[in-house]
Amino acid sequence: MHPAGFADLVEVLGVAGRAAFASQHLEEWMAPESRLSDPGLLGTARVEMAYQPKGVIGLISPWNFPFDLSLGPLADMLAAGNRVVIKPSEYTPACSALLREMVAEAFDPTQVTVVTGGLGLAREFPALPWDHLLYTGNPEVGRLVARAAAENLVPTTLELGGKCPAIVDTDSVTADTAAQIVGAKLVKNGQMCISVDYCLVPREDMARFTDLVTAHLRDRGPDFSASPDCTGIITQRHLNRLVSLVEEARARGVEVIQTDGTGLDTATRRMPLTLVIDPPDDLALMREEIFGPILPIKPYDRIEDAVSYVNKGERPLGLYVFAQDRAVAERVLATTVSGGACVNTCAVQGAVPDLGFGGIGRSGHGRHHGFDGFREVSDPRGIVRRGEGDLIDVMFPPYGDLLNAVVASALGSADSGGTK
């Protein structure tokens, strides 16, 4: 479960903020956009792109943010004029029941409705002939969702997470950098798609950076994993997987640092943040998205090596670069590809209502939030309104002298332009 204050901030205020932002800007989003035409061919015709609803949208939301990632995208979808069916996660039955109750009180069921169920519903939902389908979750299930949607040629928005790196430049091995990275990592105890998955740190600064991380945790809360601000791992199966990642590293002789003295609480499934120092790349924790309170820290020799390391992997949902030198930060951004990015902070790209949010490659495709979300679930309809003085008839058979004259004139203009 969320800590209470964080739930208010993200699941209540965050959703309300997105809805309010959409309401404030909807008129400008809906306005048709004028496009350029060829007056020689179309005369005084008006050409524009207008946005219309796609229709009925299926929305599959995850367990880690059950309200933010269902009602947040809903704001985009309703702003665009669509109807929506939400299928929340079966891992959060109490939240799903509350969501269904709230939606039923607020909306006509033909406009928005919530459906709940188990594995059978999860398999059937993406196979329906939606006008658009949004899924938030992991790449493995995302592939199944995309495959099922493709049977009906349903367009999809997939937000799939991934191994989001934090690249720390030599001038930013500081207490503030450690605080930003650890703070983001402890949100939901790492169970967040844009959490920092691993850090890349200058080789000569590895020990200092590790000390800064442990000092931050010691100062802010030496027994954090026993506090109500520490989110338990969602299921025993997920917890077992995380424990096995750490055990594999230990078995390979990799240095593992548990950052508080409380230890694992199997009753609440609260797990302390664990640092794994310079793990080899063939370990499972370096091949899989961690999605929990484990932070690998790997060394690099040059910033170009850190960039190369990131680029050898799948394109992440988020990328974070810490550099006081603006040129270094911009070079990292220019030479990497990710769904979103932050400079000198982490994960904030997911909290800005006016900033399109989504992935690329294995981390997903498409965007929600703000105008980008509005466009994602709208049909961009190109419209031509005929005016006067056009040559539209030249395109219709039978063809003759008029067509030849138009073509000759166009070719002559091109030749003339090319000799100037």
Image (tube, helix red, strand yellow):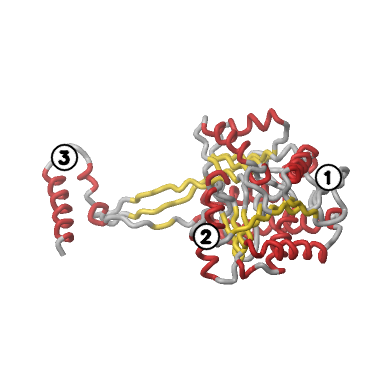
Asked if the residues shown at circle 1 and circle 2 are in contact, with their CB atoms under 8 angstroms apart, the answer is no
Which amino acid is tagged 1? Arg
* Residue 105 in view, yes or no: no
In the image, is 47 to the left or to the right of 130?
left
Q: CA distance from mark 2 to mark 3?
A: 60 Å
Q: Nearer the viewer, residue 22 or 247?
A: 247
For disc 1, the marked residue is: 269
Q: Residues within 10 Å of mark 1 (few under 14, many from 20)?
A: some
Q: Dot 2: what SS?
A: helix
Furthest residue toward front? 253
Which of these two is toward me, 409 or 388? 409
Front position among marks 1 and 3: 1
Find disc 3 in the rendering and name its residue: 399
Query: Crowding near pointer 2: few (<14 within 10 Å), some, many (20+)?
Result: few
Residue 20 rendering spot, x and y as whole percentages: 64, 59
Q: Position of residue 112 (x, y in %)?
A: 65, 42
For image coordinates 60% across by 58% down, the residue present is 300
Q: Which mark is residue 304?
A: 2
**Between 289 and 3, which is closer to the camera in this rendering?**
289
Circle 3 SS class: loop
